[in-house]
Amino acid sequence: MKLWPHCQSHWQMLDMALRLSDWREADDEIVRLALVLPDNFTGRLPIGNTGRENVSAFTQMKIPPDLQALLEPKSD
């Protein structure tokens, strides 16, 4: 994943957690924001991870087929 979109997604998740007063999620997003830079450079980003506090930041997850189709390049 590219660094900037990855950072943006966690900033947006942090913003949503704060608006919902979900302090546990907000705390987790702060930790994940701190991990974004080193994990992007070391290649330690787990594929398919949703980035929520109920999933370890290091757990790989299967990408559902409908979302995988959006990630694959279209052939013309």
Image (cartoon, rainbow, N blue to C red):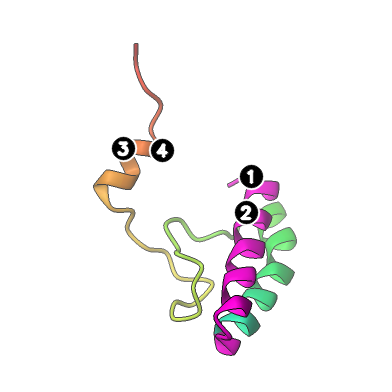
Are the residues flagged by discs 1 and 3 in contact, CB closer than 8 Å?
Answer: no
**Quadrant in which the C terminus appears:** top left
The residues tagged by marks 1 and 2 sit, at their Cα atoms, a distance apart of: 6 Å
Q: Find disc 2 in the rendering and name its residue.
A: 6
Q: Is residue 42 magenta?
A: no
Q: Mark 3 is on which residue type?
A: Ala
The residues tagged by marks 4 and 1 sit, at their Cα atoms, a distance apart of: 13 Å
Residue at image coords 70%, 68%? 33
The residues tagged by marks 1 and 3 sit, at their Cα atoms, a distance apart of: 19 Å
Q: Main secondary structure of the magenta part?
A: helix
Q: Earlier in the sequence, mark 4 or mark 1?
A: 1
| Range shown magenta | 1-24
Outermost front residue? 19
Q: Element at badge 3?
A: helix
Residue at image coords 64%, 84%? 27
Residue at image coords 74%, 71%? 34
Identify the disc placed on residue 71. 4
Identify the disc placed on residue 69. 3
**Label 3 environment density (alpha carbons within 10 Å; few <14, some 14–19, many ≥20):** few
Tell me residue 4's x, y (percent): 70, 48
The residues tagged by marks 4 and 2 sit, at their Cα atoms, a distance apart of: 15 Å
Are the residues flagged by discs 1 and 2 in contact, CB closer than 8 Å?
Answer: yes
Q: Is residue 14 magenta?
A: yes
Q: Earlier in the sequence, mark 4 or mark 2?
A: 2
Tell me residue 18's x, y (percent): 63, 79
**Label 2 environment density (alpha carbons within 10 Å; few <14, some 14–19, many ≥20):** some
Identify the disc placed on residue 2. 1
